[in-house]
Image: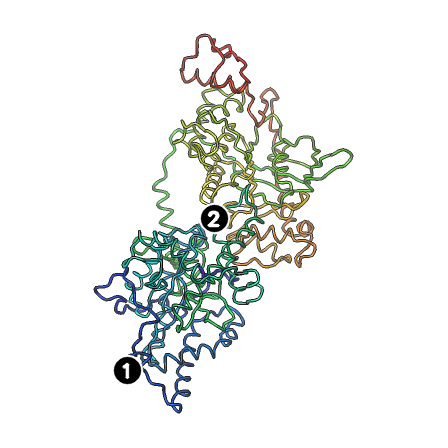
Amino acid sequence: MAPALDAFPATNGQVLIEKPSPALPEKLSPVPSDNMSPNDSVDISPHSNTRSKMSGRAINDVPDPKPSEANGTTTLMSTRILEIIFDYALNKFDDSRDRLEAGRSRFIEVLNEFIRAGSQIDMALPAFPFKSANKVYKALGFLPDKAEEIALSRLHNMCKRIEEIYEPGANVVIISDGLVYNDLLSISDRHTWIYGQALRAMGAEKGFTNIRFSRLRDFVPADSTLKLPDKMDEISYVANATNFRRFILNKFGIDGLDVDQLIATDTDTRLTYQGYRRFLMSDLRHIFTLGADRNSTAYKRETKYLAKQMLVRGVAFAGAIKHNFPNYLRLSIHQSTGEHKVSMSLLNTKTGYTTPWHCSVALMADGEWMSAPMGDFKENTRMKVVEENGRPSYFREMTEEEYLEDQRLAEEAAKLIEKPVVEEPQEPERNEDFVQWEGLTYDLKNGAKTKRLLDQMDGWLRGGTLTALMGVSGAGKSVLLDVLANRSGSGIVHGDILVNGQTPNSSKSLSATVYQQDLQFSTATVKEALIFSALLRQPKTTPVVEKIAYAEEVLSLVGMEAFADKVIGASGETLNSEQKKRLSIGVELASKPTNLLLLDQPLAGLDSQAALSICQLLRQIGRKGLAILCVVNQPSARLLQTFDRLLLLGEGGKQLYFGKIGLSCKTMVSYFEKNGARLCKADENPAEWALDVTSSTENSNYAQDWSEVWSKSPECKAMKSKLAQLRNKFSATSDLVDDPSEAVHQSAPVFDALDLQRAFYKYLHLEKMQLPAAHPTDVSASWLTNGATVLPPAYLS
């Protein structure tokens, strides 16, 4: 048993949980007694003599029933109880009932033993390990919330229904497998402990008297070499976690287990393995991020390896459960053949999100509960987060009246905090600026051969918007950035590139490019790097004081004020990856581009939180009016949705899509699905899915020429119509440069060493710092010129 799967296809991503009513059962008497704390072990040992509620005798003391009364009434009662359990079983597949029926005779035998003994029916459910590692998109936090409460309530209600027809009743023992797998999923032992303790406290508080929880000592006999303390606390739990995992593997593991053979021959194992792979792909993508050292293929290969390691541990843990809970009716949250265990649905949905630690829940306006990833609910403006016990617990859908009132209050609040503009210079409104290209091709000659890197591309960028540029390796993404930045090298460019309907003047600083590599000088400070860029790259006609003032504005915009006087240093010495990326963006902004900001994989090498932070920064920069085109490499769904449009390229620089991404990426996904692509599964990353379906090989069932599909699509015709409208709109606009004398040359993307050192002297002078009297070779900057002496500029003499 392992962390639950959430990888099954969804209908709408959210489906009702409890149809009759969202209300939870009323509180009953607490689980522990008055003198028992949640930390104390609950006696659930299957080897103890369980007493019958009807007779008071131990099970082993109950005499065998007479043949005439045994089979008929016992099996009938077992059948009725099993039908109740089946009501709570996993029912999302067409053959769900057939799978349940496959194990009916086995389940009846187990239930018959309890009924003959007149004892309480014990069921074992390995589940509730810890909250998903994907806190970015799936779960609200690392503690149990309303989703867990609903799941425990569902199990408790199942036992209560059994008690109505069978007096001894039933209980479910939750066997947490968190400590078996948590290290593989980058979950700490401490967080595993905290989650388990909070779950026990929830069961006691809500009166779920038919739910019990196992402890580590239930798996470790007294004569074992692993000695556990009599009373386990947080520190002793963490201290023994590694030893417990080793104990389970050594005692119950199988030496030389051939996992590949097991997957190939055992259906239950294969289903579990496939489920592991699906949920690992979604759970770990924000921990083991894609970048220069890990591409999509490597990530898939690594998650396969992790899934097999989980199977090795799962086999050992299953052996431990069978040894320590031999007579229990076995429940499971995984899809299975149904022959050995009953697959349960903890949240009654038809989506893949049936386990509370992998999703969130929402109370809809009509009173019904729904389950889905946290990110889906957050994107819905009608959803509000509801807190319980001082932390987020679930979402609630506002009624129409509440939603309108909430909008009204938000507008009023916005008016109250609006500050009157008093003689402040207005920023130029550039949100109506457009950069467009039509029929764009780029050919590179290699001897007598010519290779086409961009092939008949069309598109446009609007000021204030963010466009994601994606494509397989060799699709020409970086080439397009260079062509738009007028740095195409020795290749031949055909087609039109227009800025507001006019051919751009190459002497104007229209664009800036942020390259993937960080090209800052390690000995400079953050503030110096921005000032140097402004001094060297803004027009010579701009006063020096204005350049420095603008650099300080950029420092604030990129959120680096706190690091202004920090030396940049080598990689990771003083600035982390996110801060260095912010600085790289700031250095380009300091050149004061007027229309376009181009970025080549700015999210590469960043963790999920840092990548999201950079996307938010780009959105903030976009509000200043620049059009932003950003190369991204298989971003998560949440990151992709921070962009307004997507430009997707195929091999050979062919255009496959240009248009809006849409809420939850549905606009982009629906375009490919309606044109013959396979359906995008609920747990799939839309970006990876799009690359997968458009790069299918000839032998694939979905292989087709997507560039041809695009060229004939209504979306392509609408784009060409938009381009024609832009031409007409700006046809009367005068040329961008009216006076050639005002033209200034755009600096090269890499600093010139001599210019940089002169700028350094200028900066020292402006800071009123005294220069050496004899002006010797400057120690702090001589490395730029291989030790050559550069005299200060004449105006400093």
In front of the other: 738 or 691: 691
Q: Residue furthest left?
A: 35
Q: Which residue is mark 2?
A: 286
Residue 708 seen in the current view: yes
Question: Which of the 4 image quadrants contains residue 198?
Answer: bottom left
Give SS at disc 1: loop
Residue 381 seen in the current view: no
In front of the other: 134 or 737: 134
Give SS at disc 2: loop
Question: Which of the 4 image quadrants contains residue 56?
Answer: bottom left
Residue 37 placement (x, y as % from top left): 25, 61
Residue 453 placement (x, y as % from top left): 68, 39
Instruction: Identify which amino acid the numbered label 1 is placed on.
Output: Ser
**Which residue appears at 39% of the width and 59% of the height?**
399
The answer to whether 582 is drawn above or below residue 317 in the figure is above
Residue 1 placement (x, y as % from top left): 45, 63
